[in-house]
Amino acid sequence: MPALGLSDDPQIMGIVNVTPDSFSDGGEFSSHAAAIEQGRKLSEDGAHVVDVGGESTRPGAGLVSADVEIARVLPVIEALVKDGIKVSVDTSKPEVMEAG
């Protein structure tokens, strides 16, 4: 079994974008409470991992600082991990990776 505790079988990843300008969900989960609720729902519905992102990658989206991205994703990650949900963080910034 891999180090992450996932099986060799196909895995389902749920995605939660904690951004006001998400391409895929229109910013529906930009509040921490909504994002946490959605992460829990994805897990209950069968997601093996919940991927949490705090910076939109939609065409034309502006960049956000690492501090803003951390403020968006960290409370969500902490709550989901506390619930025993496996998470990943969708980021290109080392500071966000280390914080999450």
Image (cartoon, rainbow, N blue to C red):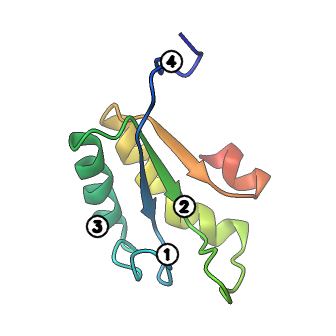
| Disc on the earlier residue, 1 or 4 | 4
Single out the residue that lies furthest toward the top: 1
Disc on res. 19: 1
Q: Nearer the viewer, residue 12 or 96?
A: 12
| Disc on the earlier residue, 3 or 2 | 3
- Residue 69's quadrant in the figure? bottom right
What is the spatial separation of the Cα atoms under label 3 and label 2, in whole angstroms? 14 Å
Q: Where 36 falls versus 98 (above or below)?
A: below
Q: Determine crowd level at label 4: few under 14, some 14-19, many 20+ residues with C-alpha closer than 10 A.
A: few
| Disc on the earlier residue, 3 or 4 | 4
Which residue type does callout 3 highlight?
A: Ala
What is the spatial separation of the Cα atoms under label 3 and label 1, in whole angstroms? 11 Å
Disc on res. 53: 2
Residue 64 at x, y = what percent?
Answer: 69, 77
What is the spatial separation of the Cα atoms under label 2 and label 4, in whole angstroms? 25 Å
| Disc on the earlier residue, 2 or 1 | 1
Instruction: Look at mark 4 in the image and give the residue it sits on.
Output: 8
What is the spatial separation of the Cα atoms under label 3 and label 4, in whole angstroms? 31 Å
Disc on res. 29: none
Tag 2's secondary structure? strand
Q: Nearer the viewer, mark 2 or mark 4?
A: 4
Tag 4's secondary structure? loop
Instruction: Look at mark 3 in the image and give the residue it sits on.
Output: 34
What is the spatial separation of the Cα atoms under label 1 and label 4, in whole angstroms? 32 Å
83 displayed left or right of 65: left
Q: Determine crowd level at label 2: few under 14, some 14-19, many 20+ residues with C-alpha closer than 10 A.
A: many
Tag 3's secondary structure? helix
Residues tagged 3 and 2 counted as in contact (Cβ below 8 A) = no
Residue at image coords 49%, 75%? 19
Residues tagged 2 and 1 counted as in contact (Cβ below 8 A) = yes
46 displayed left or right of 21: left
